[in-house]
Amino acid sequence: HLLTAVWRDWGFSGISVFLSYLRFGRKYSAIKSPTTPSAKTLAVILKKPREFSNLTQQMKKNKFLIFLILTIISCGQTKKNDSKNTYKSEVKEFIKNDKMDKSEFWKIIEYSIAKSDSDKLEQEKIIVEKLSTYSAEQIIEFEIIFRQLIIEADEFKIMGAQKIIEGYVSDDSYLYFRCWLIGKGEKIYTETLKNPEFLAENISKDEETNFEGLMYVATSAYKIKTGKKEENESFPRDVAIKKGLDYDFGAPPTKGTDWKEEELPKTYPKLWKVFN
């Protein structure tokens, strides 16, 4: 418990002080503040050397064990810190394939995440630039996949997550929230659909959960590719709607079970704790 408290409050510097005490058996000026749990604990120990002497002798005899414990704690802390960045995209090279499928769709999204540094406008620009290098038919296919994902994410549990994170839900904000979810990449999108609580540990509290611009990237890329200025029935949006992929007025019913606002804290306790 003592080692854990020292590690939590002081890190390696605190451990160093503690081990120095074990070695030399004297007070150190580094122990100044009585406000932290570890400082209080150390203060008590230093005032009662006789009561602590037996434990000290035992720990001196087990230096290797102490070293092993500290190594495990250190690795655990490193793993904890790294886990926050587990789903950051690190695409170094973009290789375009001939077929526009879900794999290619997500590759474009992941590339835009890696290159945009959390800037939504920059991410939108990168997607348009990449998408405009594909054929007109592939750009339409991108729009079709995008709409399929939007409709797939239309579930009451996703709406509940948005309510907790943003504090409100409207037709537009719910649509833009799902766009944002897609814009976060395949892993976050897929895991959130399985369990919205996934977001509690994988997005920052102050993140803007709105990516309306993602709705327009296919149209912009299509204009660049074809040189057409005015939208008509050949554009990705119209083609997709004709295929029944309407996420607006003609959208299919929201899936799952509806919720009441007072149920959300118990339904999604992790999200509630972080965002409310």
Image: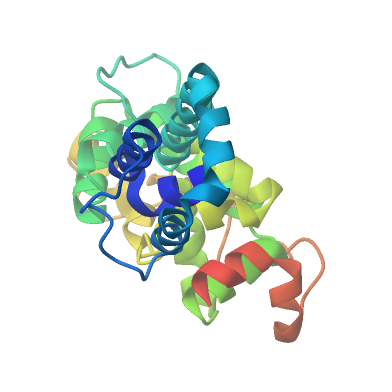
| Residue 101 vs residue 276, the one in the foreground | 276
Q: Nearer the viewer, residue 164 or 6?
A: 6
| Residue 268 horizontal side relative to residue 128, left or right | right
Name the residue rendered at 41%, 40% in the picture.
Answer: 81
Residue pictured at 28% horizontal, 34% vertical = 114
Residue found at x 55% / y 79%: 169
Q: Which of 164 and 142 is in front in this view?
A: 164
Colour approach in the figure: rainbow
Residue at image x 57%, y 60%?
247
The vertical placement of 194 against 132, above or below, is: below
Q: Can residue 250 be seen in this view?
A: no
Residue 86 coordinates in the image, percent (x, y): 45, 35
Horizontal and vertical percent for residue 224? 19, 39
Image coords of residue 142 (percent x, y): 44, 36
Residue projecting furthest to the front: 50
Q: In this view, does 96 lie to the left or right of 246?
A: left
Is residue 53 found left or right of 122 in the rendered image? right
Q: Which of the 4 image quarters holds residue 65?
A: top right
Residue 250 placement (x, y as % from top left) = 63, 66
Residue 256 visible in image: yes
* In this picture, residue 5 sits left or right of residue 136: right
Q: How many labels were placed on the picture? A: 0
